[in-house]
Image (cartoon, helix red, strand yellow):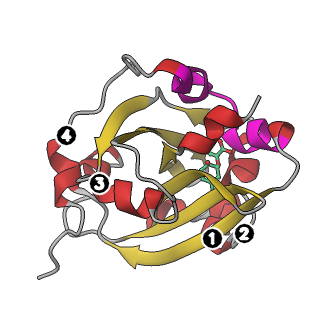
Amino acid sequence: MKIRSQSLYQRSRWLAKPMHSGAYRPWLIERGSLTARLQAKTKGFHVQALTVHNDLPCRDEAHLLGLVSHQHALLREVMLMDQQQPLVFAHSVLPHKSLRGVWRGLGRLGNRPLGAALFADPRVIRTPLQYKKISKHHALYMRAAKNLASLPPSLWARRSIFELNSAYKRQSIMVTEVFLPAVLGLN
Ligand SMILES: C=C(O[C@@H]1C=C(C(=O)O)C=C[C@H]1O)C(=O)O
């Protein structure tokens, strides 16, 4: 029986607004492509793919994606970088049933940005964002902060579901982004 590695993730509430997020707020509420925004504000933007593997999503992720319990999905984790500087850690849940049609290649992007594929298609809808201030005990924190020289007491995360209504009915994926302190230094 596989123990969900992110059990802590399930107990926390995600909020409809990033309360008291300070300088992170403009980054958190931006609904356009984060990739495009970072490309415009950096000289050395690139996506560093970390892991792409088949696994059990967290219970609340599975619930929001309409997956039955014990149903695996493709989990993609990347770091959005400016040269050697980590900016945003991204954790995406790609249900296998969604990897069809124009989305069939989303599991094989490597270092190509997921956002470019999502925002290029006018049929794709982004559902409302949810926000959470994650502490050092949160499952995503340590993966996001692994290469930071100093560990902040908490990080701001946001997530949303992207939907594509196509011939394959409703396809959806969930994207979670954890913002690292270096984004505050971008003008
Ligand atoms: C959804 C976007 O795609 C970005 C790129 C990702 C990737 O390549 O896995 C994941 C999340 C985003 O930070 C975006 O650009 O807004």
Dominant SS type (magenta): helix
> Is residue 161 among the parts visible in the rendering?
yes
Q: Earlier in the sequence, mark 1 or mark 4?
A: 4
Q: Earlier in the sequence, mark 3 or mark 1?
A: 1
Looking at numbered disc 2 in the image, what kind of residue is underneath it?
Asn
Mark in front: 3 vs 4: 4
* Other-residue count near label 1 (Cα within 10 Å), few / some / many at <14 / 14–19 / ≥20: some
147 vs 50, nearest the viewer: 147
In magenta stretch: residue 25 = yes
Q: Find the residue positioned furthest to the left.
A: 1
Q: Earlier in the sequence, mark 2 or mark 1?
A: 1
Q: Residue at x 46, y 29 (%)?
A: 129
Per the rendered image, the range of residues in magenta is 23-39
Q: Which mark is residue 49?
A: 1
Looking at numbered disc 4 in the image, what kind of residue is underneath it?
Ser
Q: Which mark is residue 111?
A: 2
Q: Position of residue 164 (x, y in %)?
A: 59, 44
Q: Which residue is mark 4?
A: 12
Give how far apart the Cα atoms at labels 2 and 1 are: 5 Å
7 vs 146, nearest the viewer: 146
7 vs 166, nearest the viewer: 7
Q: Earlier in the sequence, mark 3 or mark 2?
A: 3
Q: Which residue is mark 3?
A: 62
- Is mark 2 in CB contact (under 8 Å) with mark 1? yes
Give how far apart the Cα atoms at labels 1 and 4 are: 27 Å
Q: Position of residue 29 (x, y in %)?
A: 55, 23
Q: Secondary structure at mark 2?
A: loop
